[in-house]
Each structure stands twice: as structure tokens, then as C-alpha cells.
Image: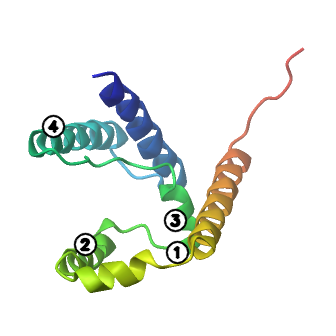
Amino acid sequence: MICFLALSVNNLGSIQAVDELLKPDNMPNRITRGVAVTGLVNVLSGFLGVIGAVNFFFSPGVIIASGVASRFTLIPISLGFLALSFLPKTIAVLGNIPSVVIGSSMIYLMCSQIAGGLQIAMSQKYNLNTG
């Protein structure tokens, strides 16, 4: 239960970060649906004994880096991953990708994430006078 509460906070933060970037309409309902779907998927995952879905705060960085915010682009990728699950030799080849390549990709995503955060922060007017 404690892990689920922590994941709920992470989920809410991820949704709100994307909200600041894209400014979609009807955000309260989107937040409610997002948290509910993530919760139901994690309950189902618990019953099946597998790791559940987790939203990552990387999402704004990926959106900025790729220029694509549509969730429908995930359908071909998910079908590709499903096909890969039936090809163990291909998975073994992918497992041999050097950690430097994977680390470089993660650094690129993190830099995009920082740029996204700065872009969001600079687009808003904050009163920084504390005195």
C-alpha cells in the first residue's frame, strides 16, 4: 500500500508535468482517469504476479526530444515489443547493447527533461521578491 501511494504521487506529478507542457482541456478529469487506470492496471498486475505500469517524469523530455505527444504512436511500438517477446534470440542480441549506449540515451533524455522543466519555468511569471 505504501508503494502504491508513492506511485500515485509519481503518477500525479507526471500527469501535471505533461499538463504544463501541452495545456490540454478538462485536466481534472484527465488526472482522475489517469490515476484510476494506473491503479487498476497495478491491481491487475499484482494478481498476475508481474510488475505494474509506472508513469515516468521522463514523458515531457521524450515529448520535447521527439516532438510527438500522441499516445497513439505507442500502439506500433507495443505491437513490436509483443512480437519481440516471441523471439528470444532477438532479445539476447538486444541484451548485448553496451551500457555506454544505453547510458548515453538516458543522458539525452535527462537533458531534454531539464530543458523541458526550464522551458515550463521560464514560460510562467513568478514573483521572486521575498522581502
Q: 76 or 23: nearer the eye?
A: 76
> In this rendering, is residue 53 above or below 40?
below
Tell me which label, 2 or 1, sits earlier in the chain. Answer: 1
User: Label 4 vs label 3: CA separation?
Assistant: 27 Å
Residue designated by label 1: 66
Residue type at mark 2 is Ser
Residue count near mark 2 (Cα–Cα under 10 Å), binned few <14, some 14–19, many ≥20: few
Residue type at mark 4 is Val
Residue designated by label 4: 43
Residue designated by label 2: 78
Tell me which label, 4 or 3, sits earlier in the chain. Answer: 4
**Image depth: mark 1 or mark 4 in front:** 4
Q: Residue 69's spot in the image, x, y percent?
A: 42, 67
**Image depth: mark 4 or mark 3 in front:** 4
Residue count near mark 1 (Cα–Cα under 10 Å), binned few <14, some 14–19, many ≥20: few
Residue type at mark 1 is Ser
Residue count near mark 3 (Cα–Cα under 10 Å), binned few <14, some 14–19, many ≥20: some
User: Label 3 vs label 2: CA separation?
Assistant: 17 Å
The numbered dot on residue 62 is: 3
Q: 21 or 89: nearer the eye?
A: 89
